[in-house]
Image: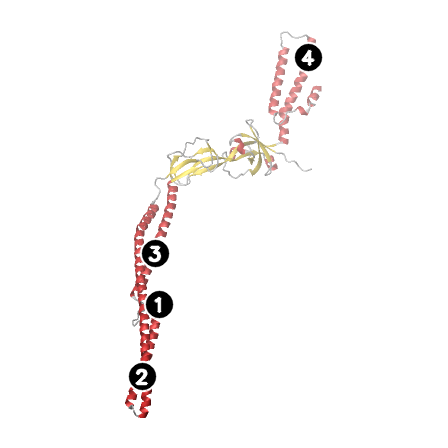
Amino acid sequence: MVDRSRAASVDPASAPSPHDSKTDAKGLQEALQEQLFDNDESGHAPEAPTASESGHRWPHLRRGAKIAIGLAIIAVFGWLPLRAIWEYSSVEAVLNSRLVTLRTPIGGRVATAQRVADQATLDAGTVVLRVVNSRGDRTRLDDLRRQKSRMENERPSLAAKLASAQAAQKDLARQATQFREGRVLQLEARIAEIQTSIEAAAARRDEASAAVERASSLAKSGNVSTVELARLTRELSVSQQTELGARRRLDAAKVELAAAQNGSFLGDSYNDRPSSVQREEEMRQRAGDLEADLARTDTEIAWLANEIIIEEVRFADLSEANITTPVAGRVWEMMTSPGEDVQAGQPLLKVLDCSGAVITANVTESVYNRLQLGDRASFEPNDGGEPISGTVVNLTGAAGAPANLAINPDALSKEPYRVTVAPRDAAAHACTVGRTGRVVFARLETAP
């Protein structure tokens, strides 16, 4: 009874810590076995001590053995339940990461862009594979090139016609200008001639008027007959009408001059424009049409050139495609091989996204119900490596949604409740996906 009380009153501070419980328990068992073997050897030694010495030493050895056995029982069978009570930990856990599946955008034959081994580390933007389609459709590209060639061949002819029309239009414009200038000079000369006729008619009118006045005075005295007076009166009237007609012709000539100066030509015919002017206008219109055709041809050539560039890019994309990695990571699974024919959309390669590393863990129902998003956690690898701290980012429960992970959470089958932890320093662990261990969750402190 005394020995049991002493064994039970051992200082709790001597109990092993949570991190070295397994090591301490194993060490205590080994020490206990050594003590027992030492006792057996000492009891069967050929040169035994005296009866008084052996009787005095045996109670001490037995008491030490009982104390060691009690400590071993406390360490092995007592600490494990205590740790389960004071710690929230997972049943099993594995370091995981997202997978990026690279698919081919076109159908064709796979060719290697560079030699890539399994589990090789790749940088973002690395060309891994190349898909070549030797049966690409280039019908539209050839049609566009033929149209552009035809338009380019027609353009010099249009340019020559435009130049000829512009030259003819300039010549006709020169002729029309010369005709207008000559017509203006002609009308000015006619006006001058009419003015001279008016002056002559005015002089004859004045002379006839004077003669009539003289004849009238002589007729009173009987020196001039009435016949002569009538003749002189008639001459005066004719001269007056001649002057009036000349003035009317002067007004008409001035109207024609003003019209000619403005580009209109008045005459006896219904056509008020000369043929040179009409032909000049027709040639100007033809030159404008040819200029519009030439501009339209240049526009179509530019459009065809742009369409050819776009079609060349499209044909290049359909005839050859480079498969690049969008993220930095390492090859997880090669799903094709060089020389294989593939279809558009077929997966070729799976890359492990090392920047998206997570920790998937299975926990018991009691631990799952105590967890919340944002809780702190620590992943302790089974190989004794450095722990990885993180945060709980997903609680999927027993019916978890499927995730695109390298290691399917269904592989963790000891408990159905799943938790996802995002490491805070995932990039520092070189994407060591597949390491197993356990996740210890921070214990929530309840408010007093």
User: What SS does tag 4 mark?
Assistant: helix
Where is residue 396, by image quadrant? Answer: top right
CA distance for labels 4 and 3: 128 Å
User: Badge 3: few (under 14), some or many (20 or more) residues near its Cα, within 10 Å?
Assistant: some
In the foreground, 242 or 371: 242
Q: Is residue 160 left or right of residue 17?
A: left
| Res 97 visible | yes
Distance from label 3 to label 1 (Cα)?
31 Å
| Amino acid at circle 2 | Ala
Residue 364 is situated, as x and y percent measured from the top left of the image, at: 58, 34
- Which labelled disc corresponds to residue 208? 2
Query: Residue 25: horizontal and vertical position, in percent?
Result: 61, 23
Reading the image, the residue beneath label 3 is 291
State which tag comes first along the sequence, 1 or 2: 2
Q: Please tell me how crowded label 1 is: few (under 14), some (14-19), or many (20+) other residues with Cα within 10 Å.
A: few
For the residues carrying marks 4 and 1, which lies nearer the camera in this image? 1
Q: Earlier in the sequence, mark 4 or mark 1?
A: 4
Mark 1 and mark 2: Cα distance apart in space? 39 Å
Earlier residue among tags 2 and 4: 4
Name the residue rendered at 62%, 13% in the picture. Answer: 40
The label nearer to you, 4 versus 3, is 3
Left or right side of 188 for 371: right
User: Residue reaching furthest right?
Assistant: 2
Type of amino acid at the residue the image marks with label 3: Glu
For residue 57, which numbered disc appears in the image? 4
Can residue 412 be spotted in the picture? no
- Which residue type carries mark 1? Gln
